[in-house]
Amino acid sequence: MAQVSLSTGQALHISSPPQAPISAQVPADYDSQVLLALLNLHQALLAAGTGVAAIAQLTLYTTAGDVEQRRHHHHLQRFLRSHRPVVTVVPVPQLEKAEWQVLITAQASGPAPALPRDVSGPEDNKVWDVVVIGAGLAGLAAADQLVQAGLSVQVLEARDRVGGRTWSEPLAANPAAVVDIGASWLNEANQTSLSRLARRVGVEFIEQNTAGNCLTQDSAGAMHTFAYGALPFDAATQAHLGEIRDIVEADCQQLDAADPQHDELDSLTFLAYLQRHNASPTAIATCSIWTRAMLGQEPQDVSALYFLHHCKSGGGLLQMRSDRAGGGQHLRVRQGTQAISKAVAAGLPAGTLRLGAPVTAIDQSRPRCVRVQTADGTTVQASRVISAIPSPVLRTIAFTPALPSRKQLLLDSYSYGYFTKAMLVFKTPFWVDRGFCGLAQSFTGPASIIRDCSSPADAGWVLTCFLCGDSGRRWSLLDDTQRVDALLDQVGALYNDPELVRSQYLTTVTHNWSAEQYSGFGCPCPSLAPGVLSAAGDVLRESFGRVHFAGTETSVHWKGFMEGAVRSGEREAEQVKKFFS
């Protein structure tokens, strides 16, 4: 683990090796070693009562070659975020242990004296039973359950709307057809909490189209047609892809959904895991589409254990990726998924919901009461608090007393990749007329996945492009016209008829979730780099004093989906109700 010394003047000197936090094993690949060394540095800073922002100088010693050295810059930027200490990279012929390819040292200021956060200001004299932070599906599900139990509830929502990452809008040229800018899919077979809410509020379902062929665009830009449920490419490649897919499926099924424990898997990136299983470049490109579409991440940025556990939470890789009954993408909501959030919010008692009220501080210094301060300085008091906002957003809230170091490590470590949805609206479903279901995947991008998100009853014909990971981030650097042109060019190439695609095109509806402040600048679900689950995963659902934590990433089942959000809210509502019984 990291070694920490304290110099005169209270400066910290930290030496952080590339070892797994529990077993101290050292993975063979460079990315995993860099990420583990950064994790150990982070743990040492928090244990000393400070954080990443206290780093004044960071030095990375590396035995790796030029290509690997360029890769670590990406990991350093993600770790430091907006903080800019002096960073020095020092190539060395060898390090203390032969298997080490990297060693990170840092100088940081010691902990500053803790100053109490002033939460004085206009105060609501009423003491609510529960304050719920966030009016997405997790927060609304919690509030709904608590109100039904007879408790007084105040819901504080930062945005001017409810729904969180459910957000639906009618098409300007065809208001009868609604598109989901945010979360889109559910099923009735095993997503019981969400489907129960959906039936209660009376929305209609649209079954995902899987009739017809699918397309894969390979690394050279060539197109491969295959039946839904089958694999693309030649027989030998299909056999290899099936082998890698089945290994991932088998390994994720071995995990405990509630308590994933596997230090070896958590010492590796998902890319290193694939390479350990001798995955070919084509197999790695295929698996990269999984991490991009599900997390917005490249496989070298996410822990193998985290990705496998993410799959396990949805019943396994195959079920989570399926568009058929019981799968993660089986049904959509004709009125848009935000209709569920709006209906639940409308059923709450008057005065329960406050919009435009971002929370800035949570103070538990007084006995039997929690004070919650919003950005306008108003203080709301409650006996209990449920945080139902994404974990990255919690980093923006000042806690008094401070969160425990392992809880803080978890929140600090959660990160989003790049994720944007762009809905291309067409006059007709030309892909259906040509015998395709609209599902396409691409190794080259800009869209990694394209799905048919049409509303046939409303004549709303839509192909939704998922711009995620590195290819999506490159696309985001284009101007508006170039972005649309790039997508139309890609769809034209996929269906081998650029003129038809452009003649049928009407408009684009898009939203960059990576610019969404109150989602934590990302979507659909934050993820973790190697080592963090082993170091702090067990505190994910732990309450802190009178504050409880919900959110889709905290769910045991269907993490990252609307179902996970609803279940997490219901789970914490049940915990809170026990204190009032």
Image: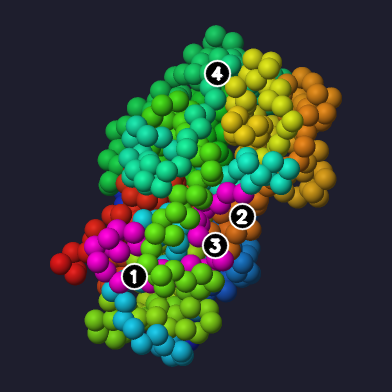
**In the rendered structure, are the residues bearing label 1 and label 3 in contact, judged by CB atoms less than 8 Å apart?**
no
Q: Residues within 10 Å of mark 4 (few under 14, many from 20)?
A: some
Q: Residues within 10 Å of mark 2 (few under 14, many from 20)?
A: some
Q: Is residue 479 left or right of residue 424?
A: right
Q: Does dot 4 land on a helix, a strand or a loop?
A: loop
Circle nearer the N terminus (4, 2) = 4
Q: Does dot 1 land on a helix, a strand or a loop?
A: strand
Nearer the observer, disc 4 or disc 1?
Answer: 1
Q: CA distance from mark 3 to mark 2?
A: 18 Å
Kind of residue at badge 1: Val
Identify the residue position indicated by label 4 in the image: 211
Is residue 145 covered in magenta? Answer: yes
Kind of residue at badge 2: Ser
Q: Residue furthest top?
A: 235
Residue drawn at the location 28% of the way across and 55% of the way down: 571
Circle nearer the N terminus (4, 3) = 3
Is residue 246 covered in magenta? Answer: no
Identify the residue position indicated by label 2 in the image: 514
Identify the residue position indicated by label 1 in the image: 153
Residue drawn at the location 68% of the way across and 25% of the way down: 429
Q: CA distance from mark 4 to mark 2?
A: 33 Å
Circle nearer the N terminus (4, 1) = 1
Q: Is residue 99 above or below residue 437?
A: below
Nearest to the observer: residue 276 or residue 202? 202
Q: Residues within 10 Å of mark 1 (few under 14, many from 20)?
A: many
Whether residue 256 is visible here, answered yes or no, is yes
Residue drawn at the location 45% of the way across and 25% of the way down: 324
Quadrant location of residue 577?
bottom left
